Amino acid sequence: MGTLLQHCEKIGLRLTDQRRAVVSVLENARDHPNIQDLYERASQVDPNLSIATVYRTVKLLEELDILTKLEFGDGVARYEIADKNHHDHLIDLKTGKVIEFYDEEIERLQKKQAQKLGYRLMGHRLELYGTPLKDKNG
Amino acid sequence: MGTLLQHCEKIGLRLTDQRRAVVSVLENARDHPNIQDLYERASQVDPNLSIATVYRTVKLLEELDILTKLEFGDGVARYEIADKNHHDHLIDLKTGKVIEFYDEEIERLQKKQAQKLGYRLMGHRLELYGTPLKDKNG
DNA sequence: GTAGATGCAAACTGTTTGCGAGGTG
DNA sequence: CACCTCGCAAACAGTTTGCATCTAC
């Protein structure tokens, strides 16, 4: 599969310093950064970067199905690389931490439910909101 | 359970013409109206109404758990009365129509999955996006 | 060399808020 | 009559865009 950068080359994206910076930040992100996050991190790589370019780059990558936009209802969009295996998200209500999970059974039932309603499932969005059962540090 | 208006009286909400108008629109809505929808419909009842009041009323009702805010990722918030039985949404990608459904099995699995991750499930958001299996009109 | 990408700042959209006036309980 | 609510318009936050300039290919 190679790096995200290589993927961008392969599909003929014009690779500017700014795009390289944003892409490398995305590649190394272990969280789900929003635009501001991306801007701040990528600015350290390319201080020239403007936030408008981050918006443009992210939108481009989203349209190319390289990125997935996440919206957890707090008004800011977050992003993650789309080529990872599909998963859903559990949001820790205490800390805001986002945990990824995949439940085959739920996936199957969603498809079934859509069919029952007369639809072919093209996508879905599942977010669980929860509080820790017990504190690991106490 | 009575009407939404009666509920608002009971909890001591000050009932102005504007709030009455917005509440009655909500009560009669068979869809999931956004702020603009509410403003336009309620304006026919009370032409005095300003959109700022719609925002304020809706936010108030949301904080009182009378309304639920829905965000389907298109940038506008939609609302529905919260006291209805819980359900999730399927969005018709062709028409934008929103269909409500409830799947006990999925609900159960979500709770289970959250527990597996060490969390108590406090809420969730499930949206299915699909295209019609076949057109009803031929 | 040229189509496409960038920075900047202004424009836009959805939403919130300060204020003085007005209405509800 | 006191406090809450209203309309208005200005303020806000996140995002998009027009334009002149610059750059990757």
Image (tube, coloured by chain):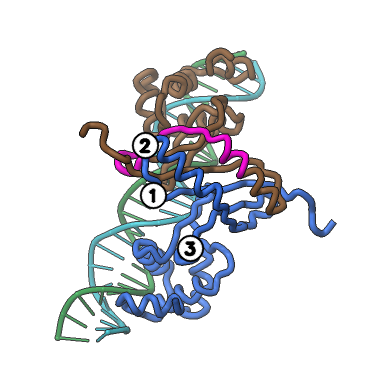
Chain colours: A blue, B brown, C green, D cyan
Vertical side of B103 occupied by A32: above or below? below
Q: Are marks 3 and 1 in contact (CB under 8 Å)?
A: no
State the separation of the CA atoms marked 3 and 1: 26 Å
Q: Residue A118 carries which label?
A: 2
Residue at point 34%, 20% (across, down): B44
What's the chain of the residue with tag 1?
A: A
Of the numbered discs 3 and 2, the one sitting upstream in the chain is 3
Q: Quadrant of the C terminus of chain A?
A: bottom right
- In the rendered image, residue B116 lying in the magenta stretch gets the answer no
Q: Residue type at mark 1: give it.
A: Met
State the separation of the CA atoms marked 3 and 2: 37 Å
Residues behind callouts 3 and 1 on a single chain: yes
> Pointer 2: residues within 10 angstroms few (<14), some, or many (20+)?
some
The x and y percentages for residue B70 are 48, 39
What residue did someone put label 1 on? Answer: A122
Q: Residue type at mark 3: give it.
A: Ile
Q: Which of A47 and B83 is in front in this view?
A: B83
The x and y percentages for residue B28 are 42, 20
What's the chain of the residue with tag 3?
A: A
What's the chain of the residue with tag 2?
A: A
Q: Nearer the viewer, residue C15 or C10?
A: C15
Numbered range of the magenta stretch: B92-109
Residues behind callouts 3 and 2 on a single chain: yes
Residues behind callouts 1 and 2 on a single chain: yes
Q: Are marks 3 and 2 in contact (CB under 8 Å)?
A: no
Q: Is residue B77 left or right of residue A127?
A: left
What residue did someone put label 3 on? Answer: A35
Q: Which mark is residue B136?
A: none
* Residue A48 visible to an observer of this rendering: no
> Pointer 3: residues within 10 angstroms few (<14), some, or many (20+)?
some
Q: Is mark 1 on a helix, strand or loop?
A: strand
